[in-house]
Amino acid sequence: LEVSPHLAHDTAGTIAEARRLWQAVDRPNLMIKVPATPEGIPAIETLIAEGISVNVTLIFALAHYEAAAHAYLRGLERSPDPHRTASVASFFVSRVDTAVDRALEAIGTPEALALRGQIAVANAKVAYRRFQEIFGGEAFAALRRRGARVQRPLWASTSTKNPAYSDVLYVEELIGPDTVNTLPPHTLEAFLDHGQVRGDTVQEGVDEAEAALARLADLGVDLGAITEQLQVDGVAAFATSYDQLLAALEEKRRSI
């Protein structure tokens, strides 16, 4: 259940609304969606400290992921009972390729075009390695002894937008321990039909992923700027959907 996206840049407002939703629903399996904006990160820490489970959403970059993971750890450290709290870090995938491919096609060289369709998976694999480092470290080991659970990476936006790519690309390449993949129905059906489970693919080719990201930078493509804009655009898109939902509910309420 998401906090209003209109509060994405309001730390205090996010905390207050998350508390209200948590208390109103009053179910232990509820997760409150909070975006990984600069203002959302301190809210996430506070909510985790209070025992409110959080889905950290709109993560597009390694920097976003690290901020979300460390906010979770800080919140657990402040929590009197960390075993009650769960969290996922929702890392958006296909939108990265859509935006980066556009930049690569604008460059148009063979080196640039060869990177199309690679950066989203590379970005996610590097983030997963960081997940292993953070939650395999001593800071989390102490929290684990108190019953804390890892904040699981959740792969979001995993339908393939480019018809030239495999329709299960972002499923097959990101399989691994402690991960979640939220699939739209058509992607799930495609994977059930012809997808392959080849083991822990998210842990394969990480050095190659790093090399692909380095080649992207060498071409002058600023992945950081692209992912920051994707987060801005994501907040705006979420706000539009949220407003449309409220309008539909209001229309239905008036009709009955």
Image: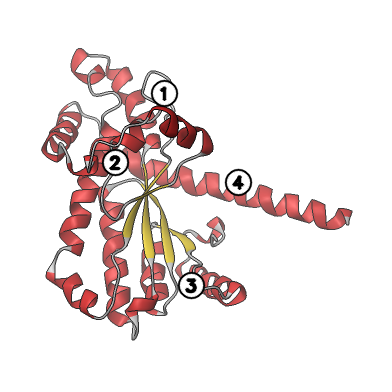
Residue under label 3: 15
Instruction: Residue under label 2, please give it.
Output: 174
Dots 1, 4 in contact, CB < 8 A: no
Label 2 residue SS: loop
Identified by mark 3, the residue type is Ile
**Looking at the image, which is closer to me, 19 or 6?**
19
Residue corresponding to mark 4? 240
x and y percentages locating residue 88 in the rendered image = 37, 59
Mark sitting earlier along the chain (1/4): 1
Is residue 25 rendered to the left or right of residue 109?
right
Among numbered discs 4 and 2, the one appearing first in the sequence? 2
Residue under the point 18% across and 50% down? 129
State the separation of the CA atoms marked 1 and 2. Answer: 18 Å
- Amino acid marked by disc 1: Asn
Earlier in the chain: of badge 2 and badge 3, it is 3
- Asked whether residue 39 is in view, the answer is no
Q: CA distance from mark 3 to mark 1?
A: 38 Å
Q: Indicate the quadrant containing the C terminus: top left, top right, bottom left or bottom right.
A: bottom right
Can you identify the residue that label 1 sits on? 162
Query: Does residue 149 lie above or below 35 as drawn?
Result: below
Q: What kind of element bears circle 4?
A: helix
Tag 2: Cα neighbours inside 10 Å, few (<14), some, or many (≥20)?
Answer: many
Q: Nearer the viewer, mark 1 or mark 4?
A: 1
Who comes first in sequence, dot 1 or dot 2?
1
x and y percentages locating residue 203 in the rendered image: 18, 44
Which quadrant holds the N terminus? bottom right
Residue 252 left/right relative to 184: right
Question: Alpha-carbon distance for marks 3 and 4?
Answer: 21 Å
Question: Label 4 to label 2, Cα distance in Å?
Answer: 29 Å
